[in-house]
């Protein structure tokens, strides 16, 4: 014998028992879609009783089966191997379907093959066009219903009308079509399948109610992804022999392409999803996509936690910023965020007042204070003497670039005229704003952290004492 192998049909059927039998339906549909010149594919699935299901798949391809021996020869050389736009590659699909059949008949333009309890035999009957595959499957009613459910997930190619039990599988309109360079499989000159990169189209489809997002290969559902959209790849996907597994690296590359192109369509509540978290850590995630991720996951008002300036973090929170800490993003996402300058340390956005630091820049002082400023100075000193029980000095800075209206360090109050403006110092017309600022600053006599309980208590205590002194006309 020149053949090295013999395949036991029943043994193969038992191995296939771990798979969902819907694969049989999808295998025959994908073969029909791959046929040259096909424009109609009809599928019939109906129960036959006693745990059996009748499956018929017929197409109108003018040529039909190019070679009938492909129907029963495993891994025979196939022209599909060299064409990335054809779904087949292993030349195993029909054989796996036959393994779970009690009987089958393949009628095509080249002749007819019959498979039954007597074995395999040929008939001279030929169809005028197309191929018709009729199978009596070992498939229960529940398994049949599951197979029918899979047919409703199909994305029929343009120009091919696909009917299941006389009902047309409606075409869906993609929400986006993206150009991408992805891995595919193609045979080389020696016939060996090799993975190569190729430009292709990726079509995104909204998931219907109750659906989980899936990866598709030219309209055939492959695996659930849990992502936002169904992704249909317009070329072969590198798959395992059973067509149920896809390389994690392929999914990663696909997700990166999708997010880079469609990040604006990802909602805030979806930014925490695993697929987004994966791609924002990739080095090729685009700056614009990183910006969208940070805007929607955290806020447009965000800062990175700054260990070098603890008060800046608290000041950021008090001003409505979200302080993003190290554990809230992966190391890759942090690297991309910083590279894109999409998030800055709190110390650069809301720096804590440090006018008294010996290594800080010198204050730009006002050359000459106005009479109104001197009145505010005397008022502030009087309040400090009455409420804080201490003497203070008052300084007038004039620096619009310095990001503080005023600061208070122990015993020293600084007003920034460059921020407040000269008119602000009119006690007659602006007393409420002046005293509100004094209350805020003097509370720092006892606590520096704006968000601390101590600071809150300091404001309450000073306000109460101030009110009491005003009632007693000491202020």
Image (cartoon, rainbow, N blue to C red):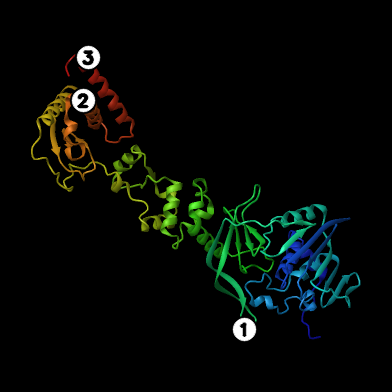
Q: Earlier in the sequence, mark 2 or mark 1?
A: 1
- Does residue 51 appear in the picture of this structure? no
In the rendered structure, the answer to whether residue 469 lies left or right of residue 141 reads: left
Which residue is the extreme one toward the right? 118
User: Does label 3 or label 2 sit earlier along the sequence?
Assistant: 2
Residue located beneath label 1 in the image:
189
Say which residue appears at 63% left-offset and 79% top-offset: 192
Q: Is residue 110 above or below residue 287?
A: below
Q: Position of residue 145 (x, y in %)?
A: 78, 53
Q: Residue at x 50, y 60 (%)?
A: 256
- Within-10-Å neighbours for mark 2: few <14, some 14–19, many 20+: some
Q: In screen coordinates, is 107 left or right of 412? A: right
Q: Are marks 3 and 1 in contact (CB under 8 Å)?
A: no
Which of the 4 image quadrants contains residue 116? bottom right
Quickly name the residue at label 3. 471
Q: Position of residue 330 (x, y in %)?
A: 45, 54
From the viewer's perspective, tell me whether residue 233 is left or right of residue 276: right
Camera-nearest residue between 46 and 360: 46
Q: Which residue does the numbered mark 2 point to in the structure image? A: 431
Towards the viewer: 221 or 3: 221
Q: Quadrant of residue 373?
A: top left
Label 2, secondary structure: give it: helix
At which x and y percent is residue 347?
A: 29, 47
Q: Nearer the viewer, residue 179 or 159?
A: 159
Q: Does 155 appear above or below 471?
A: below
Query: Which quadrant: the N terminus?
Result: bottom right
Mark toward the start of the polypeptide (3 vs 1): 1
Q: Disc 3, disc 2: CB below 8 Å?
A: no
Q: Residues within 10 Å of mark 1 (few under 14, many from 20)?
A: few
Quadrant of the snapshot with the C terminus: top left
Determine the residue located farthest toward the bottom in the rendered image. 2
Q: Is 370 located above or below residue 460 in the figure? A: below
């Amino acid at each position: 014998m020149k053949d090295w192998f013999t395949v036991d049909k029943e043994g193969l059927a038992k191995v296939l028992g771990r798979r969902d039998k819907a694969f049989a339906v999808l295998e025959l549909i994908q073969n029909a879609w791959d046929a040259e010149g096909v424009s109609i594919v009809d599928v019939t699935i109906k129960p036959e009783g006693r745990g059996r299901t009748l499956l018929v798949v017929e197409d109108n391809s003018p040529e039909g089966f190019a070679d009938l021996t492909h129907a029963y020869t495993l891994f025979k050389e196939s022209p599909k191997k060299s064409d990335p736009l054809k779904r087949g590659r292993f030349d195993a699909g029909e054989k796996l379907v036959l393994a779970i059949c009690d009987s089958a008949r393949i009628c095509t333009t080249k002749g007819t093959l019959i498979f039954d309890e007597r074995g395999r035999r040929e008939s001279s009957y030929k169809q005028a066009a197309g191929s018709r595959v009729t199978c009596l499957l070992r498939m229960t009613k529940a398994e049949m219903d599951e197979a029918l459910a899979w047919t409703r997930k199909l994305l029929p190619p343009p120009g091919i009308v696909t009917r299941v039990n006389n009902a047309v599988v409606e075409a869906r309109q993609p929400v986006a079509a993206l150009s991408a360079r992805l891995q595919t499989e193609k045979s080389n000159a020696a016939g060996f399948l090799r993975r190569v990169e190729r430009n292709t189209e990726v079509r995104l489809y909204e998931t219907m109610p109750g659906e989980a997002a899936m990866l598709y290969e030219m309209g055939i559902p492959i695996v659930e992804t849990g992502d936002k959209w169904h992704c249909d790849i317009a070329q072969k996907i590198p798959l395992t022999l059973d067509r149920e597994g896809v390389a994690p690296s392929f999914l990663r590359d696909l997700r990166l392409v999708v997010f880079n192109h469609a990040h604006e369509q990802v909602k805030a509540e979806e930014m925490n999803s695993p697929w987004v978290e994966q791609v924002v850590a990739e080095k090729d995630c685009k700056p614009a996509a990183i910006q969208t991720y940070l805007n929607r996951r955290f806020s447009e008002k965000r800062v990175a936690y700054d260990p070098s300036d603890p008060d800046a973090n608290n000041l950021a929170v008090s001003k409505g910023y979200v302080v993003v800490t190290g554990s809230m993003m992966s190391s890759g996402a942090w690297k991309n965020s910083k590279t894109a300058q999409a998030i800055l340390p709190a110390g650069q956005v809301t720096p804590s007042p440090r006018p008294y630091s010996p290594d800080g820049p010198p204050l730009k002082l006002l050359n000459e204070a106005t009479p109104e400023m001197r009145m505010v100075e005397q008022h502030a000193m009087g309040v400090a003497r009455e409420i804080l029980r201490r003497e203070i000095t008052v300084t007038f800075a004039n620096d619009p670039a310095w990001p503080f209206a005023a600061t208070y360090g122990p015993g020293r109050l600084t007003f920034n005229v460059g921020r407040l403006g000269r008119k602000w110092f009119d006690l007659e017309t602006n007393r409420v704003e002046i005293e509100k600022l004094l209350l805020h600053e003097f509370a720092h006599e006892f606590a520096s952290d704006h968000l601390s309980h101590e600071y809150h208590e300091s404001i309450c205590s000073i306000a109460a004492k101030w009110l009491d002194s005003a009632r007693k006309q000491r202020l």
